[in-house]
Amino acid sequence: MKKLIIIGVVAVFIAGCGGASSIDKAVAQVEKAIEKVEKNKDKMTESDWNSLEKEVEEPLKVIANALETNKVGVGQRVKVMTLVAKWTAVVMEAGFTEIEKQTGIDRENWGNELEKSTKDIENALEEIKKNATDSIHQ
């Protein structure tokens, strides 16, 4: 009986360590991807982004599953949540940079351009409405 208890405790310990190590590996892979983006974000091509996305897809699933099933402690949960937030920020920053390149409009002026576009759309809709009303009354 005593041997079974010891074997059971060892099995639980090993299983617990195995789960933690898969999460640790996933965290390390995402950290590595973040470093890669931070160093090369201005030089990365669409192919680089696609490759990186595939590279982190599985680790992010492992992390999400661990969070959903409460397989991580509070300390590790905080670390993982910080990592996910950092990954999101890095990807968004790179996306914003790409938008600036594509449009030629810097971020500081996006609000102004959006407001201008909204006014243009509103004016166009008013013109359509006026034309529709005029054609009904003719």
Image (spheres, rainbow, N blue to C red):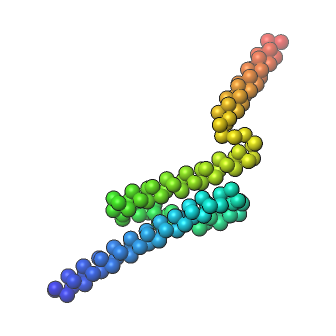
Q: Position of residue 38 (x, y in %)?
A: 60, 58
Q: Tell whether 78 sits left or right of 36.
A: left
Instruction: Look at the picture and state if 19 lies above or below 90.
Output: below
Instruction: Look at the picture and state if 116 lies above or below 86.
Output: above
Q: Quadrant of residue 108?
A: top right
- The one nearer the camera, 114 or 9, is 114
Q: Tell whether 80 sits left or right of 55.
A: left
Instruction: Look at the picture and state if 80 lies above or below 134.
Output: below
Q: Which quarter of the rendered picture does the N terminus lie within?
A: bottom left
Q: Is residue 13 visible?
A: yes
Q: Position of residue 8 (x, y in %)?
A: 25, 80
Q: Position of residue 97 (x, y in %)?
A: 67, 49
Q: Tell whether 129 sits left or right of 63.
A: right
Q: Which quarter of the rendered picture does the C terminus lie within?
A: top right
The residue under the point 54% across, 53% down is 88
Task: List the single residue furthest toward the right.
Answer: 138
Q: Position of residue 52 (x, y in %)?
A: 62, 64
The residue under the point 70% across, 33% down is 113
Q: Is residue 125 visible?
A: no
Task: List the single residue furthest toward the front.
Answer: 39
Q: Quadrant of residue 4?
A: bottom left
- The one nearer the camera, 131 or 76, is 76
Instruction: Look at the picture and state if 111 lies above or below 4.
Output: above
Task: List the single residue furthest toward the top.
Answer: 137
- The one nearer the camera, 78 or 59, is 78
The residue under the point 38% across, 76% down is 18
Count every numbered label the image shows and give the total: 0
